[in-house]
Amino acid sequence: MRQRTVLEVAFRLQYDVRDVFADRLHQLDIDLVPMQMRALRAIWSADAVTSQHIVGTLKRDKAQVTRLVNELVARNLVYREPNPEDKRSKLLKLTDEGGAIFRQIEDIEKVVFDEMVQGIDEADLETFFRVADQLSENMRQIK
């Protein structure tokens, strides 16, 4: 009998989470790809960031991030304002619409997480988090 691998389980979990999450977003007419949501999260968590911060957070090149930010600006989810600390850069902030959408995303995440962990006791979750953190750290060491 063939044993499951960590990679198989990780990919299946990633796919399942993405699939359920995409369905919930679709139900609310939120049309964002995961990279756009990650960018919104980076801006939301710091209140205002530079594009360079997004480059580091998303681990994408500047051209990709520029296109991504331009899309979010065009959709009125993000706006740029002068950076008082560096005249050469702009700060990215969420618009009211971007903030409202991000709050909806957070609400969806909470519901999906609660549904996802049904029937799993707290000790098992803590073990999962510890193991997943160690797997992630191990992967970063491979680079």
Image (cartoon, helix red, strand yellow):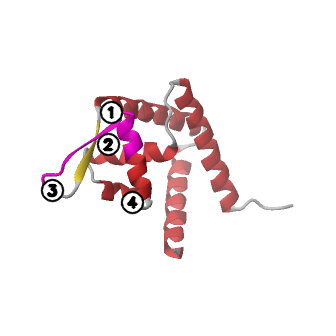
Q: Are marks 1 and 3 in contact (CB under 8 Å)?
A: no
**What residue lies at 59% left-to-right and 42% top-to-bottom?**
17
Q: Give the residue type that dot 3 points to.
A: Lys
Circle 1 — which element?
A: helix
| Label 1 crowd (10 A; few <14 / some 14-19 / many >=20) | some
Identify the image quadrant of residue 120: top right
Q: Which residue is mark 4?
A: 62
Magenta residues (range): 70-85
Q: Separation of disc 3 and disc 2 at Cα?
A: 22 Å
Q: Return the x and y of residue 15 as percentages of the image width and height.
A: 64, 46
Residue farthest toward the right in the current orientation of the protein? 1
Name above or below for residue 119 compared with residue 60. Answer: above
Q: Which residue is mark 1?
A: 99
Circle 3 — which element?
A: loop
Circle 4 — which element?
A: helix
Residue farthest toward the top in the current orientation of the protein? 28
**What residue lies at 49% left-to-right and 69% top-to-bottom?**
140
Q: Separation of disc 1 and disc 4 at Cα?
A: 24 Å
Whether residue 118 is visible here, answered yes or no, is: no
Q: Separation of disc 1 and disc 3 at Cα?
A: 26 Å
Q: Are marks 4 and 3 in contact (CB under 8 Å)?
A: no
